[in-house]
């Protein structure tokens, strides 16, 4: 077997060199190829014995033999225990994304509910990222939908504010949320600080799993108010009880018997699998999410789930209880490793019957359904990629397609955009925007903008390829535009010496009529596809996604430009003077062109201040 310039025998020999002096202690090992890329990260209770097993290449499957053949060197890190090695393994897998490890692809942070702690009237909000803000956090919620739904219910049941501090400070009358009974209007004194704090405490108790106690207390309060004939207040309490009941009934399966727990279920079809995660806190359902681990290969279900748990809880706090659909071979080791990052006992259970089995069964059903949907979409995407391959005469099925577009208004705030399409559909973490910034790119010159974008993109690609990293090389480049844009792209590729990449211009038909697009390719006559051709619809969708992303980038840039100005950098020019200057001249550019005498005519600008402004733009005044 020959792989990447190495043979299986050479790879085995390279590993043997490290085995000779390898310690017989717990630790983590890394297989590394000749370019310095990490191929695999593994943990071991006994490093020497574990790595020695790779020397018996005849007993390894084809995938591992390929890894051995690519191995040029190794790195070893010893640890005090196997549990520490397990934690370190998960951390290094997340850091290096080795091609032969099972990878958890969807690893963005989970949202929390935050009760702000720096205001007399605590604000209720969704929070992602580091917990740097003062206050109390509840979560994590597995999905944004779950946290948004919970926030809405909390507003109805506890009438807590969701507005920012600046909005709160500047209110002179209640907003619409007060009118629809989703806020107690503390901004205009409709509720005292003490009563509002009581509501916030009730909401926090509710999120901690004390919903029954809160509801019973509200019922008692409503009855007492009714007996005292305070019917309006009693009606408000009644509405809160109704909202609270809706919360309790609206989340489907919410097993109060398990308290704080995560439920993890795995469904598998060949080399494709789905892991469904349900999260429960205080007996309430905090949402669910489907994960599709990459590079599963021939690993067992137990090994896949162990890798998922090891990687997932690197960035998320583990609950005291984790219920799994499969028996884990190293459950005790995982418990010990997770406990190292927590100050409480963590238990991993594979329930076979009883109350704890019910949420596992539901998670398993969801995992199977999500996997079927995923496979169906994947099959449709593969079929469409095959059709695109045939249409444009590609030698192989395209694995990475880049689509480019520009956006600007009369040349101002110009941006270029690149989206990426792969076997899984849109790869949004690979999207890139390019601020048009070169002096030789004339404002409003679409061809020059495209040349700048493509030059910067493919110069960077060449730098990456010089380091033997070809993973980001596109198989197909689609450009929004016709013959002129295609000519601009051809010029860039010729100047940079880019070869082996198919590129196509897509131009709208007469009157920019979608459905009558023309396709332009080097050395070929322009052609069209039938209006009902599914390939045309797919290409239109890709082009429209690039257009959407470009417009969004342009709007963001324009918004930032509106909020900032050259005037912000001038000494003694605060918000009031800045506003006066912009109202008088219309723009910072007009202020730059104005004489000192004209600047002095602005309300609030003295002679000395006018001199400061003029000198900032022109140097010393005459």
Image (tube, helix red, strand yellow):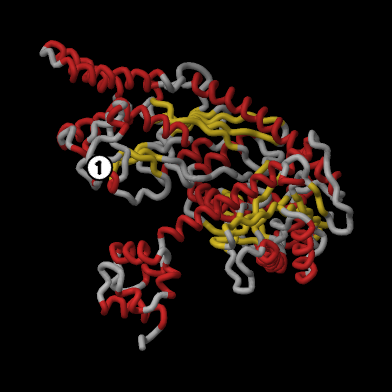
Image-quadrant location for residue 542: top right
Residue drawn at x 46%, y 38% is 335
Residue drawn at x 54%, y 48% is 90
In the rendered view, would you say 284 is above or below 141? above
At mark 1, the secondary structure is loop
In the rendered view, would you say 58 is above or below 537? below
Q: How many marks can you see? A: 1
Kindly tell me whether residue 209 is visible in this rendering.
Answer: yes
What is the residue that sits farthest to the left in this orientation? 228
What is the residue that sits farthest to the top in this orientation? 227
Q: Nearer the viewer, residue 270 or 7?
A: 270
Residue drawn at x 30%, y 66% is 577
Relative image position of residue 264 (x, y in whole percent): 53, 31
Residue drawn at x 42%, y 41% is 317
Relative image position of residue 360 (x, y in whole percent): 52, 24
Relative image position of residue 584 (x, y in whole percent): 36, 65
Q: Nearer the viewer, residue 46 or 464?
A: 464
Relative image position of residue 103 (x, y in whole percent): 61, 45
Image-quadrant location for residue 540: top right
Q: Is residue 243 left or right of residue 454?
A: left
Image-quadrant location for residue 102: top right
Kindly tell me whether residue 59 is visible in this rendering.
Answer: no
Image quarter (top left, top right, bottom left or bottom right) of the C terminus:
bottom left
Q: Nearer the viewer, residue 229 or 581?
A: 581
What is the residue that sits farthest to the bottom in this orientation? 622
Q: Is residue 272 left or right of residue 219?
A: right
The residue under label 1 is 171
Image quarter (top left, top right, bottom left or bottom right) of the N terminus:
bottom right
């Amino acid at each position: 077997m020959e792989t990447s310039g190495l043979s299986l025998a050479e790879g085995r020999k390279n590993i043997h060199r490290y085995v000779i002096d390898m310690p017989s202690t717990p630790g983590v090992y890394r297989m590394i190829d000749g370019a310095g890329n990490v191929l695999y990260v593994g943990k071991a209770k006994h490093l020497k014995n574990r790595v020695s097993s790779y020397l018996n290449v005849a007993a390894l499957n084809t995938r591992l033999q390929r890894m051995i053949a690519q191995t040029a060197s190794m790195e070893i890190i010893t640890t005090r225990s196997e549990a520490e090695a397990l934690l370190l393994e998960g951390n290094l897998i997340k850091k290096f994304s080795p091609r032969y490890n099972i990878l958890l692809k969807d690893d963005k942070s989970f949202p929390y509910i935050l009760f702000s702690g720096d205001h007399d009237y605590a604000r209720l909000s969704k929070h992602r990222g580091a917990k740097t803000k003062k206050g109390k956090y509840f979560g994590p919620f597995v999905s944004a939908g779950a946290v948004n739904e919970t926030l809405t219910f909390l507003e109805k049941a506890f009438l807590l504010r969701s507005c920012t501090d600046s909005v709160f400070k500047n209110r002179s009358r209640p907003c619409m949320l007060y009118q629809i009974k989703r806020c107690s209007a503390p901004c205009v004194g409709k509720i005292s600080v003490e009563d509002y704090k009581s509501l916030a405490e009730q909401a926090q108790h509710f999120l901690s799993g004390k919903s029954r106690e809160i509801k019973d207390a509200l019922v008692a309060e409503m009855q007492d108010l009714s007996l005292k004939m305070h019917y309006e207040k009693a009606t408000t309490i009644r509405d809160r009880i109704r909202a609270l009941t809706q919360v309790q009934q609206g989340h489907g399966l919410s097993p109060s018997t398990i308290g704080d727990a995560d439920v993890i279920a795995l469904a598998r079809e060949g080399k494709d699998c789905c892991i469904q995660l349900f999260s429960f806190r205080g007996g309430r359902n905090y949402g669910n999410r489907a994960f599709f681990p990459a590079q599963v290969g021939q690993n067992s279900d137990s090994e896949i789930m162990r890798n998922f748990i090891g990687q997932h809880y690197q960035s998320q706090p583990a609950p005291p209880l984790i219920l799994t659909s499969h028996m884990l071979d190293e459950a005790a080791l995982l418990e010990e490793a997770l406990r190292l990052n927590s100050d409480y006992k963590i238990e991993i259970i594979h329930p076979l019957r009883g109350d704890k089995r019910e949420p596992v069964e539901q998670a398993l059903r969801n995992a199977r359904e999500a996997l079927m949907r995923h496979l169906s979409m994947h099959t449709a995407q593969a079929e469409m990629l095959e059709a695109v391959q045939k249409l444009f005469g590609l030698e192989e099925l395209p694995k990475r397609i880049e689509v480019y577009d520009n956006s600007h208004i009369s040349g101002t705030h110009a941006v270029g955009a690149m989206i990426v399409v792969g076997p899984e559909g849109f790869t949004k973490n690979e999207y890139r925007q390019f601020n048009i910034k070169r002096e030789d790119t004339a404002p409003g010159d679409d061809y020059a903008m495209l040349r700048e974008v493509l030059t910067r993109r493919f110069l960077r690609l060449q730098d990456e390829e010089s380091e033997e990293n070809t993973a980001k090389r596109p198989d197909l480049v689609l450009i929004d535009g016709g013959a002129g844009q295609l000519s601009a792209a051809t010029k860039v590729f010729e100047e940079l010496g880019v070869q082996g990449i198919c590129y196509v211009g897509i131009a709208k038909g007469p009157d920019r009529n979608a459905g009558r697009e023309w396709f332009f390719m080097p050395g070929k006559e322009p052609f069209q596809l039938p209006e009902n051709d599914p390939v045309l619809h797919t290409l239109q969708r890709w082009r429209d996604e690039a257009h959407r992303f470009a417009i969004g980038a342009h709007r963001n840039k324009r918004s930032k430009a509106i909020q900032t100005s050259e005037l912000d950098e001038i000494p003694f020019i605060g918000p009031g003077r800045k506003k006066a200057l912009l109202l008088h001249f219309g723009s910072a550019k007009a202020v730059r062109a104005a004489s000192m005498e004209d600047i002095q005519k602005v309300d609030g600008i003295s002679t000395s201040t006018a001199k400061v402004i003029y000198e900032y733009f022109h140097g010393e005044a005459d």
